[in-house]
Image (cartoon, rainbow, N blue to C red):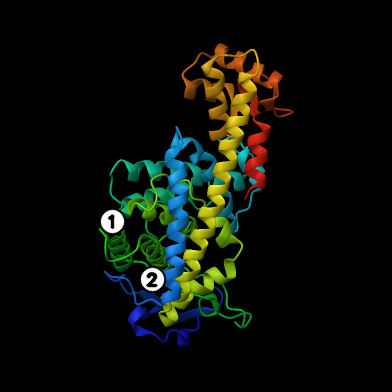
């Protein structure tokens, strides 16, 4: 890491670290430890406040539409699947969106799909934890990270704050063959009690009442920066940090339903994303990072809002198709809602969710297949393991974002 880049001492401190490379021998360097987040908003330029205001307006429009739905939670699961696919891609774990949307969540076909679907499970549990009034704590964050790593090679080193030094990226001008720690683009806090204490301070900061002091968009940006800079876990920090963006917006009541999909915008601009994060640490450049972050939230909210409207329109079309048929059962409409919330499903999963008999669900699903409302995947077999989907829903989810 080029320690000469860190020219603003107010942002944190460079602390000595050392170790031994099994091939190159002993080394020493320095790591960056960020200062605690301030209680008030950093001094920002007018342009930054305008970007923040635009993001707040887009978030309000998204939330207004979500809260007007008969079932605001209906679109949570497909939004989480989209977020899971994109946030994992940012960390180098790629699975095509259609594969994520159509995956058997109980038996993912590949290690990549398992990691992506771990995010969906973690986020659902995390949002439930927060909505029930439980605190954001080090134990909550550790459990979430452990869930992300479930079934991966790093599961044994997960579920707790890291106990080893990590490095992030590689400088393009770094010499070949040198110590990895010296070639790194960034070196976060060393492990130990100080790291745990700073993560605890961040959790406390996130739960504080920022009303009148820090705008929710700015608070989400600041919390995200601090988490990523601490890099408190062995792996999964990027995914967990982007999940916490939505958690902060929910806590500060800028959102009431976690349908926001933030990662696609950042994934498309990952180099600038990393540069803006680093610029806060090196120069104290909150303006560039918060402006970038706010524009990302604005775009994410606009895109998620558009997809939400598209899915609501599809829902209406499919229900009109049922009304024009011989089917009159409310249960058929419930299956349409279930197919929107779950882009692919089995009879057994629908049976449990809708609290209907297997025979009743099976009959209705097959009738909806005859109407063209639903279809089944080739090669998925028969009976309880057969997977169904609404073609219009899958097309909307893969084409509108």
Residue at disc 1, secondary structure: helix
Q: Is residue 84 visible?
A: no
Q: Position of residue 66 (x, y in %)?
A: 46, 42
Residue 314, by quadrant, is top right
Give the residue at the far right of this rendering: 378
Left or right? Give the position of 92 relative to 60.
right
- C-alpha gap between disc 2 and disc 1: 25 Å
Q: Position of residue 232 (x, y in %)?
A: 40, 62
Q: Which residue is mark 1?
A: 207
User: Please, is residue 83 above or below residue 343 in the view?
Assistant: below
Closer-to-camera residue (362/325): 325
10 Å crowding of disc 1: few (<14), some (14-19), many (20+): some
Q: Is residue 257 visible?
A: yes
Closer-to-camera residue (315/75): 315
Q: Which residue is mark 2?
A: 190
User: Please, is residue 298 above or below residue 6 in the view?
Assistant: above
Q: Position of residue 151 (x, y in %)?
A: 52, 44
Residue at the image point whose x is 56% and y is 52% from the top: 303
User: Please, is residue 124 above or below residue 260 in the view?
Assistant: above
Left or right? Give the position of 7 relative to 206.
right
Residue at disc 2, secondary structure: loop
Residue at the image point whose x is 64% and y is 30% from the top: 389
Q: Earlier in the sequence, mark 2 or mark 1?
A: 2
Closer-to-camera residue (88/109): 88
10 Å crowding of disc 2: few (<14), some (14-19), many (20+): many
């Amino acid at each position: 890491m080029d320690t000469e880049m860190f020219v603003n001492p107010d942002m944190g401190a460079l602390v000595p670290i050392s170790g031994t490379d099994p091939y190159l021998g002993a080394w020493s360097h320095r790591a960056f430890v960020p200062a605690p987040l301030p209680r008030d908003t950093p001094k920002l330029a007018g342009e930054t406040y305008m970007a923040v205001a635009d993001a707040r307006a887009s978030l309000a429009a998204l939330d207004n539409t979500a809260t007007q739905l008969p079932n605001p939670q209906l679109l949570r699961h497909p939004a989480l699947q989209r977020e899971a696919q994109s946030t994992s891609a940012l960390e180098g774990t790629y699975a095509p969106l259609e594969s994520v949307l159509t995956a058997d969540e109980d038996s993912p076909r590949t290690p990549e799909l398992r990691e992506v679907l771990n995010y969906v499970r973690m986020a659902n549990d995390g949002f439930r934890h927060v909505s029930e009034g439980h605190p954001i704590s080090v134990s909550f964050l550790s459990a979430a990270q452990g869930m992300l790593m479930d079934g991966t090679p790093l599961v044994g080193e997960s579920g707790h704050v890291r106990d080893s030094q990590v490095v992030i990226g590689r400088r393009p001008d770094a010499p070949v063959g040198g110590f990895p720690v010296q070639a790194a683009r960034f070196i976060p806090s060393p492990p130990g009690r100080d790291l745990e204490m700073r993560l605890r301070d961040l959790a406390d900061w996130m739960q504080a009442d920022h009303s009148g002091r820090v705008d929710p968009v700015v608070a989400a940006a600041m919390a995200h920066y601090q988490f990523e800079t601490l890099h408190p876990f062995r792996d999964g920090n990027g995914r967990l940090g982007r999940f916490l963006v939505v958690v902060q917006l929910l806590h500060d009541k800028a959102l009431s339903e976690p349908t926001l999909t933030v990662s696609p915008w950042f994934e498309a601009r990952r180099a600038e994303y990393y540069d803006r994060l680093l610029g806060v640490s090196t120069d104290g450049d909150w303006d560039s990072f918060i402006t970038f972050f706010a524009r990302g939230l604005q775009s994410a909210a606009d895109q998620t809002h558009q997809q939400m409207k598209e899915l609501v329109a599809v829902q209406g079309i499919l229900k009109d198709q049922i009304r024009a048929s011989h089917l009159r059962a409310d249960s058929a409409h419930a299956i349409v809602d279930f197919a929107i919330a779950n882009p692919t499903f089995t009879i057994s999963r629908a049976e449990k969710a809708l609290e209907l008999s297997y025979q009743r669900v099976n009959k209705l699903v097959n009738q909806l297949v005859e109407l063209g409302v639903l279809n089944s995947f080739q090669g998925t077999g028969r009976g309880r393991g057969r997977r169904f989907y609404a073609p219009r829903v899958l097309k909307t989810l893969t084409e509108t974002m």
